Image: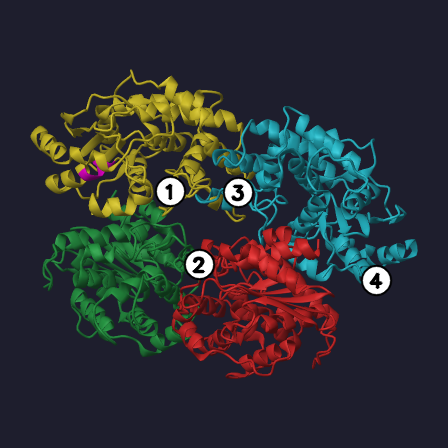
Chain colours: A yellow, B green, C red, D cyan
Amino acid sequence: MEKILQRVIDNNRNLYKYGKVADYIPALKNANIKDCGISIIDKDKNIFSAGDYNKKFTIQSISKIIALMQAILDIGIEEVFKKVGYEGSEKPFNTISYLGENKTEKAINPMINSGAIAITSLIKGEGDEKFNKILNLVRTLASNPNIDYDRDVYISEKNTGDRNRAIAYLMKSKNIIGGDVESILDNYFKQCSINIDTIDLANIGLSIANRFKDIEINADIDKKKISSLLIAIMTHSGMYNFSGQWSVEVGIPSKSGVAGGILSVVPDKYGIGFFGPSLDKNGNSLLGHSVLKELSKELNLNLF
Amino acid sequence: MEKILQRVIDNNRNLYKYGKVADYIPALKNANIKDCGISIIDKDKNIFSAGDYNKKFTIQSISKIIALMQAILDIGIEEVFKKVGYEGSEKPFNTISYLGENKTEKAINPMINSGAIAITSLIKGEGDEKFNKILNLVRTLASNPNIDYDRDVYISEKNTGDRNRAIAYLMKSKNIIGGDVESILDNYFKQCSINIDTIDLANIGLSIANRFKDIEINADIDKKKISSLLIAIMTHSGMYNFSGQWSVEVGIPSKSGVAGGILSVVPDKYGIGFFGPSLDKNGNSLLGHSVLKELSKELNLNLF
Amino acid sequence: MEKILQRVIDNNRNLYKYGKVADYIPALKNANIKDCGISIIDKDKNIFSAGDYNKKFTIQSISKIIALMQAILDIGIEEVFKKVGYEGSEKPFNTISYLGENKTEKAINPMINSGAIAITSLIKGEGDEKFNKILNLVRTLASNPNIDYDRDVYISEKNTGDRNRAIAYLMKSKNIIGGDVESILDNYFKQCSINIDTIDLANIGLSIANRFKDIEINADIDKKKISSLLIAIMTHSGMYNFSGQWSVEVGIPSKSGVAGGILSVVPDKYGIGFFGPSLDKNGNSLLGHSVLKELSKELNLNLF
Amino acid sequence: MEKILQRVIDNNRNLYKYGKVADYIPALKNANIKDCGISIIDKDKNIFSAGDYNKKFTIQSISKIIALMQAILDIGIEEVFKKVGYEGSEKPFNTISYLGENKTEKAINPMINSGAIAITSLIKGEGDEKFNKILNLVRTLASNPNIDYDRDVYISEKNTGDRNRAIAYLMKSKNIIGGDVESILDNYFKQCSINIDTIDLANIGLSIANRFKDIEINADIDKKKISSLLIAIMTHSGMYNFSGQWSVEVGIPSKSGVAGGILSVVPDKYGIGFFGPSLDKNGNSLLGHSVLKELSKELNLNLF
């Protein structure tokens, strides 16, 4: 397996030059555009890695999956989806215009910024509690109690977050979210700044693929149902407005982050973590697209 | 199996009263709102049916899957997706406003009207040839050479098709489609008027689930790749702007039609055909939603 | 006066190079981009002209004012404005996307394409009758019985009119217009192809400025009210989405056409006709903007 | 004149029941829906009033005209209109969706909320200085040094201003505004809370109608040009998305506020102030519409 991973990475890593790293905050701008690493963990917890698998990066939008799970644990599926929808979208991650229309009463889905901010607002807890719950869930799913957040990235996100601030105030004015907007955003910016590596992501992916079988969950909710929901949502909107094409070309339910990470789940089989900060125009890892496409063919991982 | 089907139908068929039949053309308005039938065919071609499985109805939007397949056979995946996108959408099936924007160069996906009209335009052939190819492919996939179209429905569709006409002319003005608009629409209205029953649909579903293994295909394209693509597209946009919620609640890739039919594919396992003309607000069969949700749980058919 | 006109034209005519002639049909593409002519007629019917005032060009969108007047004469103000609105807009002349939204029941205003096509549909008469009424009204207002339409331009408009066709079918599907779409468009394309010169335009402008005092009108409608309405509509939307800036910088109610013509009305004082086919990015005559801006200052014609 | 005013008010004041008072903050909700007052001041400063002309109300959106003037005095016309457009719009006063689109670089016009917030941000000054300049300009134009703002209304506006907050942050993220958003909004909410009566409004209207001839202006800008600009902008967008119909039916350049006030300008002739808190669906005073329509006809005040 490690040979396959190494070969696929070697076949693709030069494509980095067709993308560029996120540049809206300095911390992300300083990423090494050539980085490319992958980890796969199978059901027996064997870990296979290749490339820059030991590099740390911030989780960014991949936290949206964990926050969604936490909100479901806190208030249940039905209450969560009163505030966000289930649908894929052809719109970019930071879309806001639809929220300005009178009829809108929900964010499109939990994987775009508006939906993710709404999800964070739904997690129970005052002050930093929402964030701490998300951090703890990341640690549990990744089997890594040392995971923490990057204060510099958090401060940068906070200082450049005016569009997210606009999204949050607009949702507040429409009663999609309640409570103190700056505090919700604070929790949101912190959750995006959690530091991880590809092994952490692969472990999280395996927890979902395994239907959380070794995870203790303090809620009366069917574990299989939660994992199926997360996988379905990742399928529909995990790769932003590239999700449809991703399903056709790769066929592995995944969620990407703007720092270059990708969390992938092969149901009942594997968890996969990828890192490559060179981004395509949709904000997904460019190398992640080509590496996972080849790997999916090689290992026959296409779900469809 | 037939007992299960009968039980599930009995459990749900009274819900018909929460929906209503399509009323934009007389032929559809005359459907019996209480009708509810299902057929499942397994890999060994055993057919199980219950309820009103022998009623005929028009294929309507389910033809979009067949037309997409025909266009791929004619000009290949790459050329097809230069004119339509892959994405799910939170917009309704007859959305047009996005096409009016300057930057738009594609229909969102092949499962909404704009994309389906574009797909029909891409099938090679003059006059009725596009339609005849689609009809033949339906017959082949359904193993039923007697399938034909309903002239009354076709005439009605043609007479009330001004919104589709607008969509087509707008795409022509943007070079998304070429050729004679009325002729393309004629083919499109005819393909929507093909008459089928749930066994036909289940056979089509099985052909896809089986990766077309018994189907002869006159093209150099990998059969498995085509079936995966169709299943991925059905997953993302087969149930219009309910597709995400459908994946979460049912988890079986499906395509619905406004006459009440649903084509469902359980990859490598089953083809399913459903008929129930009482529609929900998204234009999907209301009974289809509840029946397939229960059946998915009962038979463990959720893909995610 | 003629000296002033000549000076203003001389001061501005070299600016033609910052614009370009309309190129969507050959007939317009062949216009001489350097042409620049103006005519002013005062209340005593004295005619003052300078530059290329004797060149013929097609009336294009300026016909929208005449068609609006004809529709008001035929069915009254109230009925007309049930199908079109009164508002200015920040959207371009060929905007369509708003019509695709469910709630829309009117075209924004009679000066954009959708509204103008709706207006033409409201004029009473079968076949060419709508057009013939418009042509006759142009002749009457311009005091020139020899005005006719340009068959080549008409044929070209018809052959390239797919976006207008889409607009019309969309309005038909929403019951904003009724009747045969191709016939309505035929009348519309013909009205846009009427051939005129700047003296014709100045005469039309004077008729409006004069409150139609010498014009016989076969209707029970107050002439002053019609002229005020036309002037208000020209003010709000006569120069497309440049109308607001036009009011600030020029302050003379005007209507432009894509062939380079501008009809201007100084209420109770002057009618002005301008011709200069070099267009700015809004589709208005670039020289018309600078010439009328200077002339407005020079002669103190700003209405505000 | 006072007899005419009284008669027009008597003819219309019972129509109050077809509208309703603004209810988004308590202070406005407590207005007396039956109030109806008017003041007209002619060029010789004769004041004519009728009805509830001595009632105080908050200026609300009418302050947008004064703030626009102050911004022009501070940085000039050209700089101001780099951040806001000139156009009328068919969209409501609190429209935001267009700002979410990538290409947008300006607010549509200075009379909708987004544009007005941008205008306030452009006025020079730290802390309360922007507001104080606007307050002083109101006092000067109204010849009333006792005008002040209503602290309760200001606090209410601030507490319910999430949509305006969203608009402001969105503009900040697009570099349409700079500086501290909460401080800009603070100035904006205060300017909306300035307390006035119809005589104050009529005096402001007369100052504009008179081309500011008795007003000392600390800037090198042509007074006539400023007044023409304000009148043109009021014409195009002073009555929100009813501005076009207002021009056709009333024909007097005006600006309304949600507390029920209307500022009207008859160029070179009259200033008019109206108050009637019963609002129509566009957010304009319902009685103001009918009273000014009748008065315009009676006194022949239609500009067009």
Q: Earlier in the sequence, mark 3 or mark 4?
A: 3
Asked if the residue under mark 2 is in contact with the one under mark 3, i.e. CB atoms within 8 Å, the reply is no
Q: Amino acid at mark 4?
A: Glu
Q: CA distance from mark 4 to mark 2?
A: 47 Å
What mark, if any, has residue D298 been given in the picture? 4
What kind of secondary structure does the magenta stretch mostly adopt?
Answer: helix
Classify D181 as above or below B263: above
Which of C122/B72 is in front? C122
Q: Residue at x 40, y 20 (%)?
A: A132
User: Percent x, y for residue D203?
Assistant: 82, 43
Q: Amino acid at mark 1?
A: Pro
Mark 1 or 3, which is nearer the eye?
3
Q: CA distance from mark 4 to mark 1?
A: 55 Å
Q: Amino acid at mark 3?
A: Lys
Circle 2: element type: loop
Circle 4: element type: helix
Report the chain holding disc 4: D
Q: Residue furthest front?
A: C3
Classify D286 as above or below C178: above
What mark, if any, has residue C20 been given in the picture? 2
Q: Which residue is disc 1 drawn over?
A: A92
Magenta residues, as a range? A286-290
Which of A299/A262 is in front? A262
Is residue A287 highlighted in magenta? yes
What mark, if any, has residue D106 been given in the picture? 3
